[in-house]
């Protein structure tokens, strides 16, 4: 393991040294030529560099203007209004792409990865939901593994958020700019307001952005209120969301830009658990029974960009980010309990990860014979600490019994040790364009290494499962890819790609131990192997913004899927426990599944000279557990959208139909959601009298259709007669206003 670590560190240092030396050589070359270099100010539409993760034919981009036009304020909105291949699972707070979710889909914000935090014992999870859409300039969706640029975790794909830059707000010919926005959504009676302002003084730009959102529970089609399991209306809830973003950018002669970014996101939600208050049980209507959710993300980064001032530079462009980031999720409960354990019941369950990271790459273009090369070399690293703790007060604290009823109640402890983790990767790819043939070939490879080192803490040792500090874990993998593209003509590009993917086990999968003698036990597995994938994809990009589309066909195989399952008596004994001590069973993580996921995605759009436009899209994915031959319930059913609209220079209207197939009988989902069709109507107006003003409005689920989302209900405990509790919102409306300056 030491030799692996040494090789990884040496490789990383070499890549960093190359990045530094290349940039220095480029600057010296320009200086010796005697050319007066003007400061470079990036304006207008951002052009993706060769090393950017979104620069791939498997990616799609949604701009700020498109987000505003379609009133996209969440990942769920993105999948409903723009991309049918994107879904959001509210039960796990994770984006779902091509049948994978959670820590199998990577989320990047300005190139910085977000950790998917999950506390298996305390029902706390999430990651991609830690972003405010008011602050975004673009959203790119990469589908499938792109091993040479995204790496660890991107088995299903990646969601790439880019936040606003000062240049996105400052229009041509001005030295300042900004926007304010507000809106209302009746689906959860939420209101938001935000403002951003940017100023340029010579070669220095600065931006401040702040937003606030306040809302309640998401509506459904339930009609029964009150308390108890018969309730079908959503539990009442109130939430607040805050986001602050600051950016400072300094342009320097020679094509260099240095920056400082600070961001703070916070979400708080309180829920009145009326459906769980049943007469004669531990939680009754006459007592208090509430829960809470908190989600925080804070980051500070030093940013660097370089764009060569001339075409003969050794380095064409480069990017680097040095950052600190902390994420935390809290699940809480504040209740009055009845029965044999009567009294207050309070819980505050926290899981967090914080650390320092670096990522960077540079592109270098050169020619060898008739072949034009663009070489990309890059690295990424993250050194972090993960922590978990449960604090609480109840009739069993301090802990008094290893036997029921107190044996079922564990708090004021850590269910896993603190874990110091290191992740380091280096990657390279070379895009080779063969003369004027229209053919290009891009081979790439990535090396990922990780190390998890658990640390003893008093809070972990107080765990009633009396755990022994587990061993650390370290492993590495090479993930190659090759992409072939052929530009048949200016309107048709064909491509094919083979890529391998990699996901390292998380701290909680390896080390989280929850339970105790006399009850049940959930144990981590420090011997888990990383998950890997092997994927093939072919497709085409057709036409332009006026008339075009795309088609993608993909097939992926996965090995060493990490999943939790029940242990047999022999396995419990082999793990060092007595099966008789745990009458409710023992579960744990294992590399148990081989799976395959395949499917097709289509899209087409057409704009007519008379102002009409139409578009359509389809996403079909099927996942199969190759050991049981059952369908994977994490795969969303077939979804199709068809839209038609009319637009002038100042106003427009759109109608969108969304159709979703029902869940197959071969799925393992506990509730098989039926299919449905929805109609949404939206309109926009940009009055000539008020420059920069945009007003958007929409009616969603026009015909008030009752329906269930398959991903949100796949693991739900849906009881007979209370199915309507899990339905999605009926007819609702949104209205939003944005003023640009």
Image (cartoon, rainbow, N blue to C red):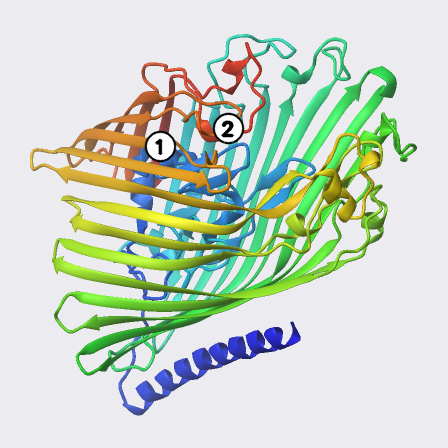
Q: How many numbered badges does the structure rendering display?
A: 2
Mark 2 surroundings: few (<14), some (14-19) or many (≥20) residues within 10 A = many
- Residue at 60% from the left image edge and 74% from the top image edge: 4
Does label 1 or label 2 sit earlier along the sequence? 1
In the rendered image, which quarter is residue 587 located in?
top right
Q: Is residue 339 left or right of residue 490?
A: right
Please tell me whether residue 480 is drawn above or below residue 414 in the rendered image. Answer: below
Would residue 145 be visible to someone looking at this image? yes
In the structure shown, which secondary structural element does the residue marked by tag 1 occupy? Answer: helix
Q: Nearer the viewer, mark 1 or mark 2?
A: 2
Q: Is residue 115 left or right of residue 430?
A: right
Check if mark 1's residue and mark 2's residue have beta carbons within 8 Å.
Answer: no
Residue 631, image x, y percentages: 45, 34
- From mark 1 to mark 2, how far is it between C-alphas? 22 Å
Q: Is residue 489 left or right of residue 581?
A: left
Q: Is residue 596 left or right of residue 514?
A: left
Q: Nearer the viewer, residue 539 or 607?
A: 539
Q: Which mark is residue 80?
A: 1
In the structure shown, which secondary structural element does the residue marked by tag 2 occupy? Answer: loop
**Residue closest to the far left:** 609
Q: Which mark is residue 669?
A: 2
In the rendered image, which quarter is residue 613 located in?
top left
Mark 1 surroundings: few (<14), some (14-19) or many (≥20) residues within 10 A = many
- Residue at 57% from the left image edge and 33% from the top image edge: 240
Q: Nearer the viewer, residue 447 or 317?
A: 447
Would residue 74 be visible to someone looking at this image? no
Residue 141, image x, y percentages: 37, 48
Please tell me whether residue 562 is drawn above or below residue 260 in the rendered image. Answer: above
- Residue at 45% from the left image edge and 69% from the top image edge: 360
Q: Nearer the viewer, residue 499 or 114?
A: 499
């Amino acid at each position: 393991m030491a030799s692996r670590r040494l090789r990884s560190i040496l490789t990383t240092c070499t890549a960093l040294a190359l990045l530094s030396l290349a940039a220095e050589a480029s600057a010296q070359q320009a200086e010796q030529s005697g050319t007066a270099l003007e400061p470079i100010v990036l304006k207008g539409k951002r052009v993706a560099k060769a090393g950017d993760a979104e620069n791939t034919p498997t990616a799609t981009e949604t701009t700020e203007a498109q987000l505003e036009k379609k009133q996209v304020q969440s990942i769920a909105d993105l999948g409903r209004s723009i991309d049918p291949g994107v879904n959001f699972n509210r039960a796990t707070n994770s984006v779902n792409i091509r049948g994978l979710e959670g820590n199998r889909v990577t989320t990047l914000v300005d190139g910085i990865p977000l950790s998917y935090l999950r506390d298996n014992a305390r029902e706390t999870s999430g990651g991609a939901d830690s972003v405010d859409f008011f602050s975004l300039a673009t959203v790119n969706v990469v589908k499938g593994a792109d091993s040479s640029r995204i790496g660890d975790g991107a088995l299903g794909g990646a969601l790439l958020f880019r936040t606003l830059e000062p240049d996105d707000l400052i229009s041509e010919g001005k030295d300042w700019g900004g926007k304010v926005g507000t809106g209302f959504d009746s689906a959860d009676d939420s209101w938001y307001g935000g403002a951003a302002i940017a100023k340029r003084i010579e070669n220095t730009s600065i931006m401040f952005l702040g937003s606030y959102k306040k809302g309640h529970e998401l509506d459904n089609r339930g009609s029964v209120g009150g308390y108890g399991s018969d309730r079908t209306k959503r539990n009442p809830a109130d939430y607040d969301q805050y986001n602050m973003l600051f950016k400072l950018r300094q342009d320097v002669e020679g094509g260099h830009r240095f920056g400082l970014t600070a961001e703070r996101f916070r979400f708080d939600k309180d829920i009145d658990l009326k459906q769980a208050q049943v007469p004669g049980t531990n939680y009754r209507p006459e007592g208090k029974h509430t829960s809470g959710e908190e989600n925080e993300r804070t980051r500070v980064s030093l940013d660097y960009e370089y764009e060569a001032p001339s075409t003969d530079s050794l380095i064409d462009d480069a990017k680097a980010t040095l950052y600190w980031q902390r994420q935390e999720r809290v699940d809480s409960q504040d209740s009055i309990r009845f029965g044999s354990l009567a009294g207050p019941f309070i819980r505050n369950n926290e899981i967090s990860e914080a650390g320092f990271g670096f990522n960077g790459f540079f592109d270098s273009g050169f020619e060898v014979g008739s072949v034009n090369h663009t070489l990309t070399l890059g690295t990424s690293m993250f050194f972090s600490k993960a922590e978990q703790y449960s604090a609480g007060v109840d009739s069993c604290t301090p802990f008094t019994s290893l036997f029921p009823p107190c044996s079922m109640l564990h708090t004021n402890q850590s269910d896993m040790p603190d874990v110091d983790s290191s992740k380091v990767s280096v990657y390279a790819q070379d895009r080779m364009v063969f003369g004027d043939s229209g053919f290009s070939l891009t081979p790439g490879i990535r090396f990922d290494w990780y190390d998890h080192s658990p640390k003893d803490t008093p809070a972990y040792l107080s765990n009633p499962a009396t755990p022994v500090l587990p061993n650390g874990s370290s492993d590495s993998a090479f993930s190659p890819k090759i992409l072939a593209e052929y530009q048949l003509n200016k309107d048709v590009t064909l491509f094919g790609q083979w890529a391998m993917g990699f996901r390292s086990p998380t701290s909680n999968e390896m080390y989280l131990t929850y339970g105790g003698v006399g009850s049940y036990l959930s144990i981590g597995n420090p011997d888990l192997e990383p998950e890997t994938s092997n994927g093939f994809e072919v497709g085409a990009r057709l036409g332009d913004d006026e008339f075009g589309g795309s088609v993608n066909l993909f097939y992926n195989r996965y090995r060493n899927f990490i999943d939790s399952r029940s242990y047999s008596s022999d396995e419990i004994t082999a793990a060092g426990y007595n099966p008789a001590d745990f009458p409710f069973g023992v579960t744990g993580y294992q590399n148990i599944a081989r799976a395959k996921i395949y499917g097709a995605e289509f899209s087409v759009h057409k704009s007519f000279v008379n102002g009409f436009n139409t578009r359509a899209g389809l996403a079909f994915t099927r996942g199969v557990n190759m050991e049981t031959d059952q369908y994977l319930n994490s795969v969303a059913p077939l979804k199709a959208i068809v839209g038609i609209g009319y637009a002038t220079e100042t106003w427009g209207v759109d109608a969108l139909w969304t159709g979703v197939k029902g869940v197959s009988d071969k799925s393992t989902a506990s509730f098989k959601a039926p299919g449905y069709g929805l109609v949404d109507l939206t309109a926009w107006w940009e009055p000539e009298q008020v420059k920069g003003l945009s007003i958007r409005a929409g009616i969603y689920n026009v015909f008030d259709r009752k329906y269930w989302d398959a991903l949100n209900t796949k693991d739900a405990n849906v009881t007979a007669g209370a199915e309507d509790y899990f339905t999605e919102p009926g007819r609702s409306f949104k209205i939003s206003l944005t003023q640009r300056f």
